[in-house]
């Protein structure tokens, strides 16, 4: 991983050595970095930068403000101590140094486009994977109209290129006859260009071509109302003509697309065309029991809100996607995935859901009404992923469920939502082989008595997949498999930690990896650009969860960190003054586990908390 990572495609985020740069001295310090990083190919005069950010000040004062902001910025990003400076500074110019140990998501995004378009579907998907939301979403700088104007233009350029990528992917799907996936890309396009009638037109045609004429006509009505309300215009003649062709039955699915069965509405709408989920995850292993539990609970009429609860890195998202994929036949109006990671505030929940459903955007209040009206008579499953930072707004979910009687919600979160209707599925690590396998070869016996191969253990399989992804010729010996099993046990089967550990197999022996894991979690990092910042190291996972806690919970965790082997309530009370409610709250926040009335930390958190208790360094509060 680069030493300095700057994320501009979504909320502004900067990490240094894997740790979040919590804040800059002022918004204009952050704006200076964002502007330089976004236009890293060019140098900028100090006079132009001063005018950009301090246009209301006289030139001399603006230049002084720039010097002060630059000094503050260099201190925040460790520029003075970098082996190669992140900023190229002269007496008259400033420029971001792309040759330094730094990465900028926008630079990688733009590199996917040549001649103004993505040359291949793979390049388009790579570009879209970098986008966490709108360019510098929510970023504001007071008293700087030139910067705001630049921000609008830059955001429009990013949205335009995103639209080109989505169009390219949709057309590629159309050429292959996969109109189902084509609608997935086109709905994403509408989320960023809701008033583009040509995109609405394309979705209407795709829906009809995928065997959903009713859905196509319904979307035409949405388009017509949107154009009338927002722009005061009627649909173009070409759109109206397309709708007439659909009504006359002139657009039918190609031979390779099976039309929906006309017998019932449920069988018609419960086709794969109503499944709007990310692609099947390549690194999904095991979880058979958990998948069965989710299916059983979602089949129960009493369970309408199911939360998959676990610490970061445990594989909640992959499990939810795979479980939702199996539910497509049970929800007549579709299974939809809503990524909440880019959502900054609880009052934008409805807005995010509208976007994922491919509906026209609206402000928070109007979005709530529009969302409830849309879902009111629909049998739908919504997968709400990464809910933990929005838990303060969880009371919106019961209101939504009341408005839509056939709706069900599958939520992933690091914290319990504390709702009366919430059902919980606590998620632990992948299966690991039993201890003391030395000398037993690759075979072991499960409790049922059937001998098993270590290759078939989910955690070992995940480790091997990650190694063989980088080294296809890797063929583990029996001793290797036993050592891999030991690493997986040390990491308690946590998928993210296993993936991070496996990535070191090219430069370290398995024994060295195991030794490093026993010593702490410093080894567990990744340089991959398309991994979310919060998952690029185990410290980043810890940090993200730490920020969700209140002051009292943080204090309790520091005090409880002295119990490396766990403790009972009496010991927790004696050392930290913890009450039963305190301990229950830490369990609900995925920071403690309990067995036989004994409380323990997850293996990934224990060494970080212990280091913090020893040194006094406050992880997550830098």
Image: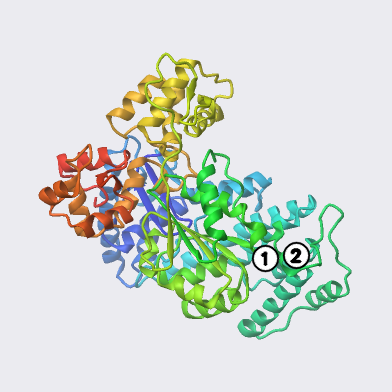
Q: How many marks?
A: 2
300 w.r.t. 448: above or below? below
Q: Would residue 70 appear left or right of 2 to someone viewing this image?
A: left
Q: Please give the name of the residue rendered at 75% of the width and 70% of the height, measured from the top-left corner.
A: 216
Residue 185: image location, x then y, percent? 66, 58
Q: Which quadrant of the structure image shows residue 526?
A: top left
Q: Residue at x 33, y 67 (%)?
A: 54
- Residue 172 horizontal/vertical position (percent): 74, 51
Q: Which numbered disc, 2 or 1, marks the residue that appears first in the sequence?
A: 2
The answer to whether residue 264 is visible is: yes
Residue 268 badge: 2
Q: Nearer the viewer, residue 151 or 463?
A: 463
Location of residue 335 (image quadrant): bottom right
Foreground pick, 419 / 527: 419
What's the CA distance linking mark 2 and mark 1?
A: 7 Å
- The vertical placement of 520 against 161, above or below, is above
Task: Estimate the x, y position of residue 387 in percent, counting from the top left.
Answer: 43, 60
In this picture, residue 29 sits left or right of residue 455: left
Label 1 element class: loop
Q: Is there CB contact under 8 Å for labels 2 and 1?
A: yes
Q: Residues within 10 Å of mark 1 (few under 14, many from 20)?
A: many
Mark yes or no: residue 185 visible.
no
Q: Is residue 51 shown above or below 515?
A: below
The residue that label 1 is drawn on is: 332
Query: What label does residue 214 carry, if any?
Result: none
Q: Secondary structure at mark 2?
A: helix
Q: Position of residue 598 (x, y in %)?
A: 24, 44
The picture quadrant where one finds residue 23 is bottom left
Q: Residue furthest left?
A: 574
Label 2: few (<14), some or many (≥20) within 10 Å? some
């Amino acid at each position: 991983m680069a030493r300095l990572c700057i994320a501009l495609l979504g909320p502004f985020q900067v990490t240094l050595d894997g740790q979040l740069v919590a804040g800059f001295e002022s918004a204009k310090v952050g704006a200076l970095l964002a502007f330089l990083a976004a236009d890293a190919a060019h140098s900028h005069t100090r006079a132009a930068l001063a005018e950009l950010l301090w246009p209301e000040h006289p030139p001399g004062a603006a230049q002084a403000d720039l010097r002060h902001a630059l000094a503050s910025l260099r201190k925040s990003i460790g520029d003075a101590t970098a082996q190669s400076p992140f900023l190229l500074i002269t007496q008259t110019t400033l420029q971001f140094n792309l040759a330094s140990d730094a990465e900028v998501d926008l630079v990688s995004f733009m590199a996917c486009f040549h001649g103004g378009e993505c040359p291949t579907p793979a390049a388009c998907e790579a570009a879209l994977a970098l986008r966490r939301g709108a360019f510098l979403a929510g970023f504001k700088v007071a008293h700087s109209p030139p910067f705001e104007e630049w921000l609008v233009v830059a955001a429009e350029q990013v949205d335009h290129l995103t639209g080109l990528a989505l169009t390219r992917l949709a057309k590629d799907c159309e050429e292959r006859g996969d109109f189902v996936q084509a609608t997935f890309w086109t709905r994403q396009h509408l989320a960023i260009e809701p008033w583009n009638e040509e995109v609405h037109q394309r979705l209407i045609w795709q829906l009809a071509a995928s065997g959903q004429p009713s859905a196509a006509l319904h979307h035409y009505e949405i388009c017509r109302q949107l154009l009338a309300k927002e722009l005061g215009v009627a649909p173009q003649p070409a759109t109206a003509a397309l709708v007439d062709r659909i009504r006359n039955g002139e657009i039918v699915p190609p031979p390779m697309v099976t039309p929906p069965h006309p017998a019932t509405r449920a069988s018609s709408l419960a086709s794969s065309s109503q499944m709007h989920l990310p692609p099947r995850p390549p690194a999904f292993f095991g979880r058979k029991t958990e998948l069965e539990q989710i299916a059983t609970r979602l089949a129960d009429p009493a369970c309408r809100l199911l939360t998959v609860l676990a610490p970061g890195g445990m594989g909640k998202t992959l499990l939810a996607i795979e479980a939702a994929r199996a539910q497509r036949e049970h929800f007549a109006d579709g299974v939809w995935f809503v990524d909440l990671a880019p959502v900054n505030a609880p009052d934008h929940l409805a807005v995010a859901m509208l976007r994922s459903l491919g509906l026209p955007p609206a402000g928070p209040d109007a979005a709530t009404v529009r969302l409830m009206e849309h879902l009111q008579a629909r049998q739908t499953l919504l997968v709400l992923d990464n809910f933990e930072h929005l838990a303060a707004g969880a009371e919106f979910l019961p209101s939504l469920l009341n408005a839509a009687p056939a709706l069900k919600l599958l939520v992933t979160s690091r914290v319990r939502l504390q709702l009366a209707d919430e059902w919980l599925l606590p998620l632990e690590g992948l299966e690991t082989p039993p201890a003391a396998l030395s000398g037993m070869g690759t075979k072991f016996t499960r409790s049922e008595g059937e001998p098993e191969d270590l290759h078939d253990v989910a955690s070992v399989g995940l480790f091997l997949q990650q190694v063989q992804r980088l080294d296809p010729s890797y063929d583990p010996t029996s001793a290797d498999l036993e050592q891999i099993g030991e690493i997986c046990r040390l990491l308690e089967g946590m998928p993210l930690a296993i993936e991070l550990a496996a990535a070191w197999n090219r430069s370290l022996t398995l024994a060295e990896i195991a030794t490093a894991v026993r010593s702490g979690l410093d080894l567990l990092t990744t340089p991959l650009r398309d991994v979310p910042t919060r998952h690029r190291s185990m410290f980043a996972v810890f940090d993200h969860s730490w920020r969700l806690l209140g002051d009292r919970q943080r204090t309790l965790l520091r005090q409880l960190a002295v119990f490396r082997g766990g403790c009972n309530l009496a010991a927790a009370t004696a050392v930290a003054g913890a009450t039963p409610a305190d301990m229950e709250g830490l369990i609900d926040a995925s920071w403690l586990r309990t067995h036989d009335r004994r409380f323990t930390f997850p293996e990934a958190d224990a060494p970080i908390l212990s280091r913090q208790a020893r040194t006094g360094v406050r992880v997550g509060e830098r």
